[in-house]
Image (cartoon, grey):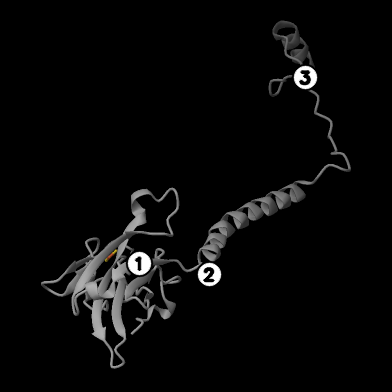
Amino acid sequence: MTPTGATTGQTTFLTAFTGWTTMEPEATQNPPADAPSRRSFFWWLTAGASAVAAVAAGIPLLGYFLSTRKRDAKWINLGPGSAFPVAETRMKTFENTLKEPWDGMTANTGVYVRNLGKDKDQKDRFLVLAVNCAHLGCPVAWFAESGLFMCPCHGGVYYANGERASGPPPHGMFHCDWKVDKKGQLWVQAPHYPTEADPLVKDNKPKV
Ligand code: FES
């Protein structure tokens, strides 16, 4: 290192007393011909990061399609249809046969059943509704005095027939599939967690 403005004699003097020496400019080092250029390095870096992001984004999408695949129907016996009084709504609880080992208490669920009486052909008619709110899935409560279902989470309200009355739910409650066998037993199809994309029955239409 040479102080600015020093002459050759001064340099010799400083070298003798300080040990400073003149630094020679470094020789220009040319990279080997086969070394990757900076541009190709960043290209591969970007491509790798894009691939990782694509995989990360694809996993939830894959889960969505797998969750909406057709399930084997499982049915749960709710007992004799005649046990449900006409024009009254009753909660019927059961252990969901669609449960997973890790579901724990949440496997205990239920449906709301309203006996609509018989049609002109003497066939039973029922309204069977999921307990999950159509907004974010909280279990709704039935209030017979007011004839309304109410959601404790954000104030969603539904009429007795399951149609939306007010609040944030985008539509009425989710309908369940049901049937009555030859012995008069009422069955409900084991309900999965209903969503807009994956309701419990096609187009969320009531059976009757
Ligand atoms: S979850 Fe029921 S109103 Fe939001």
Residue 69 place in picture, x, y as percent:
54, 67
Image point (64%, 51%), residue name: 49
Q: Amino acid at mark 3?
A: Thr
Can residue 49 be seen here? The reply is yes
The residue to which callout 1 is attached is 77
Of labels 1 and 2, earlier in sequence is 2
Nearer to us of marks 1 and 2 is 1
Can residue 170 be seen here? The reply is no
Q: Quadrant of the C terminus?
A: bottom left
Q: Is residue 196 left or right of residue 44?
A: left
Of labels 1 and 3, earlier in sequence is 3
| Disc 3/disc 2 C-alpha distance (Å) | 81 Å
User: Which residue is at the far left?
Assistant: 145
- The relative height of residue 5 versus residue 163 in the rendered view (above or below) is above
Q: Amino acid at mark 2?
A: Lys
Res 22 label? 3
Kindly state the secondary structure of the residue where label 2 is placed.
loop
Of labels 3 and 2, earlier in sequence is 3
The residue to which callout 2 is attached is 70
Quarter of the displayed picture in which ligand 1 can be seen: bottom left
